[in-house]
Image: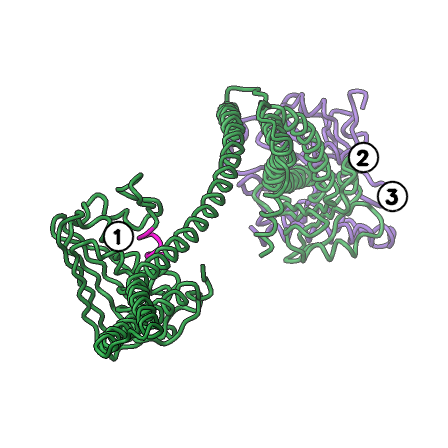
Chain colours: A purple, B green
Amino acid sequence: MRVQTALAARWICASLLGLGLAVSSGTARATEASDLETRVKAAFLFNFARFTEWPAATEGAKDFMICVAGNDSTLTVIRDTLQNKEVRGKRPTVRALRTGQDGSGCQMVYFAADEPYSGFGELPVLSVGEGLEFPRQGGIVGFHLVDGRLRFAINPGQAKTAGLKISSRLLELADIVGQGG
Amino acid sequence: MARFSLIRWFGDLTIRYKLRLAIFGTSALALLIAASAIVPFQWVTARDSLQHDLKTLAEVMAANSTAAISFGDRRAAAEILAALRVRPNVLQACLYARESDALELMASYPPVATASLCSAQLSASNALTAKHVRGSAPVLFDRENLGELIIVESNAALVKALQADLLTMGGVLVVCLLVAFFLSTLLQRLIAMPLIELADTAARISNSNDYSLRAPKYWHDEVGALIDTFNTMLGQVESAERDLREVNSNLEVQIQERSRTNATLQQTLGQLQETQAQLVQTEKMASLGGLVAGIAHEINTPVGVCVTAASTLSSRSDELKQAFENNALTASGLKRFIEVAGQSTDIIMSNLHRAASLIQSFKQVAVDQSNADHRRFNVADYINEILLSLRPKLKNTHIDVQVDCDPELSIDSFPGVFAQILTNLVMNSVVHAFEPDSTGRIQITVRPTATGLSLVYADDGSGIRPEVLPKVFDPFFTTRRGMGGSGLGLHIVYNLITQQLGGSIHAVSTPGEGTEFQIEIKSIEHAQPESYSRVS
């Protein structure tokens, strides 16, 4: 437990540091930078899961299912990052979400940049995407960069529609969008 | 030592101050005790409560900062800590994120320039320092320890609360002392005033001796009972004093009367003593007169015989002369004359001798009686001379006087006194002991003693009745008043023996058998000096 916690903390610090490096080094080393950025986002995904409550029906599932809509490298990075982690006593399972699949069976879906997203409606899925527009257009959480720092925006109304309870502490850190926010 | 002097100091205070001090002291002490219990208790309670508060605050803020730590959001963390500004006493707050096994500072309050201070706080314990209260809480989330939050607050609030407590206590003390003042004033009226009045009354009485004063009574308590008793005692003293004064004034009158009577008595006594002395002198003179009468009577006989013989001789001489002138003188006539002349001369000579010897002996007694000087004299001879002078008194009686005395015995004393003693005793016997015609016997026995001589004078007369015996030496006591008894004879004897001769005399008598006077006489060298200075 202590090891995991320590690791989590290290990721955060490392990722933020890395993020800074990535921003400063520009796009010349986009692939590496993208890797690091993805790892930071994976840590964020893990934390989103920790600060969110799913309806009791889905909480009963054995594993915590994280579906990733993106290329394989992104999937691999996220899977590696979340290895040996626990969300409320459950091991997170990372799998790919192919185009056309609905989100059923997934508790969280991450849409990498440029991945098409149509919205899950009332399905209890925490959808995370890129950009401020993502939560405005049917998604719940969207990553964006502010002054070189990774931040996220949340649409609480969409989360409510999905039947998810997002911790107020998480909301405090987020930029609120939708519902006039 | 100091304790005793403090108690003595308190004990010497007036009751007024004692009461006030006791009430003040008690209330102040009670308050101090209460304060000394309450203030630390309040302090500890307030401190515990503050610590608890701080801990709770730290826990709440730690819980609030879970997301900020999870996402590494320093700005959000700083914002969370910034909420502490509503607590002005917070000096410092530090939020740490757990990195590996070490803690890394995430945010601090106040935001600037406290990073170094925070690193010092990490190693500090939760213990309360002199000026600070420290509360810390781990940042726990989902069974993970994400970090640590430490809040340090100054204990200004505690000090303020303590000050408020002390101020309240002070206010209560002042109020209590005011109440105590009123209470003590009231108590003073209830307790001290009656006592003070009582003491005042007592002092006024002792100053003025006016026992009609009374102490005023206020209440029916113990002091009231005391005052009642005091007043009752005053009443008793007053009446006793009045009685005493009355008795005193009576006594004074009595004393005045007594002293007046005494003076009269003294005067009477003086007169009496004077009279007595005169009487004694008179008696002495009478005794001397008797002696002279005795001498005259005694001498009268030989002188008379001489006169007769001389006249016979004279007439025979005339007859012889006539016969011679007429030449009728015969030889036988001359022879007869010579015989008669010889006889007459013999008679005259012998009688003149007798007269001369009588005068000689009387002369000595008379000189002694009128002379107070002492000399050495032969006791037996002197007794015989005295008895000779008494012969006229004894001649007509049938009293036989026997003297038993060593002819050689002599004593240095007052012969005149001695003579008067013996004369008076003999005359006493003659007058009182014997009937005029009865026969009697007087025995005088003289024996020498170490200091003088003892003389026992005994007669076998009628004796003295026992009830009279103790009074025989009293002046003017006589059983023959109006029959020639002066009542001074034995008194003079007693006085002469006890005072002039320094001796003693005791009378022993059996009625019908006789009286015995036992006399001790001291010679001049053994007598008391005053014995012969008091010559009467």
The chain that hosts pointer 3 is A
**Which residue sits at x=72%, y=22%?**
A157
The chain that hosts pointer 2 is A
User: Residue B428 — which label?
Assistant: 1
Nearest to the observer: residue B263 or residue B269: B269
Q: Is residue B94 magenta?
A: no
What kind of residue is marked 3? Asp
B466 relative position to B319: left or right: left
Distance from label 1 to label 3 (Cα)? Answer: 175 Å
The chain that hosts pointer 1 is B
Q: Nearer the viewer, mark 2 or mark 3?
A: 3
**Which residue sits at x=27%, y=68%?**
B383
SS category of the residue bearing label 3? loop
User: Residue A147 — which label?
Assistant: 3
**Which residue sits at x=63%, y=53%?**
A6
Label 2 neighbour load within 10 Å: few <14, some 14-19, many 20+: some
What kind of residue is marked 1? Asn
Where, quadrant-wise, is the N terminus of chain B in this rendering? Answer: bottom right
Dot 1 and dot 3 residues touching (CB under 8 Å): no
Q: Which residues are magenta?
A: B489-495
Residue B223 appears in the picture as rendered? no
Nearest to the observer: residue B259 or residue B132: B259
